[in-house]
Image: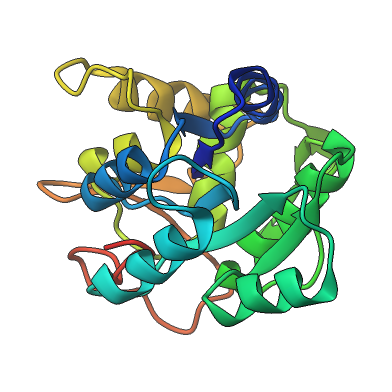
Amino acid sequence: MRVLVVDDEPDLVEAVARGLRREGYAVDVAYDGETALDKAGFTGYDLICLDLTLPGADGLEVCERLRAASAGVPPRVLMLTARDSIADRIAGLDRGADDYLVKPFAFDELLARVRSLLRRDAGRTTAVMRVGDIALDDARRRARRGDRPLDLTAKEFALLRYFMTRPEQVLSAEHLLEHVWDEHADPFTNTVRVTVGTLRRKLTEAGEPSSIETVIGSGYRLRDPGARSPAPDGPPSPDRGR
């Protein structure tokens, strides 16, 4: 999942970004509202952690402009602020924020709220995702296939998590690069193909049938044995922020 962290406190931004990256999220950062809007205009972020008090355009204006500029479904917005009055919270939520977290906060709480907001997009109510015999516990960062634990790198875990939020959808390499890797990823490398390949091998190393298939000319798809019928080949449904 691709996350943008926006705050004018560099130490806080780096701490939050570092923590989210440890959890396998692809994270970009911005230190003012206009930069955040510029980045959101080019990248389909799944979630934006947004400070309320920013130089230039403040968090409320950024949130409102994100909603107005979105051609599809806008990204989830978690407002981060030292303003703790009821009126401030109401203002943030009314201007388009999905959740509100008051500073100072514990990183574990922020992480739980991030997971909760991203679950809403996948239509889930718990941190455990299941597709066929694959289970992924986002809160504990564990994955299994049947009774076999999966030993995944952080990037492989993030890639599997993204596939599992969109089973039966054909996802292009470009789409995966945008949502599972951050802005520093080189779009001209074969990093997506290599990571998909290692993840696929780990999912099938005990002889299980392949779950991730290559759709020639289009991308990759995680098959769901419980689905009624295969999804048509083609681009995935519109993303948040598109």
Residue 134 appears in view: no
Camera-nearest residue between 168 and 88: 88
Q: Is residue 90 left or right of residue 36?
A: right
Q: Residue at x 30, y 71 (%)?
A: 237
Q: Is residue 12 left or right of residue 224?
A: right
Residue 117, position as x, y percentages in the image: 66, 63
- Above or below residue 27? Residue 125 is below
Camera-nearest residue between 43 and 32: 32
| Quadrant in the picture for residue 111 | top right
- Above or below residue 88? Residue 20 is above
* Image quadrant occupied by the C terminus: bottom left
Residue 32, position as x, y percentages in the image: 42, 37
- Above or below residue 48? Residue 201 is above
Q: Residue at x 32, y 38 (%)?
A: 35
Q: Residue at x 55, y 67 (%)?
A: 225
* Total count of labels: 0
| Quadrant in the picture for residue 194 | top left
Residue 118 appears in view: yes
Camera-nearest residue between 228 and 112: 112
Q: Residue at x 22, y 40 (%)?
A: 174
- Above or below residue 106? Residue 68 is below
Residue 69, position as x, y percentages in the image: 25, 69
Residue 195, position as x, y percentages in the image: 42, 23
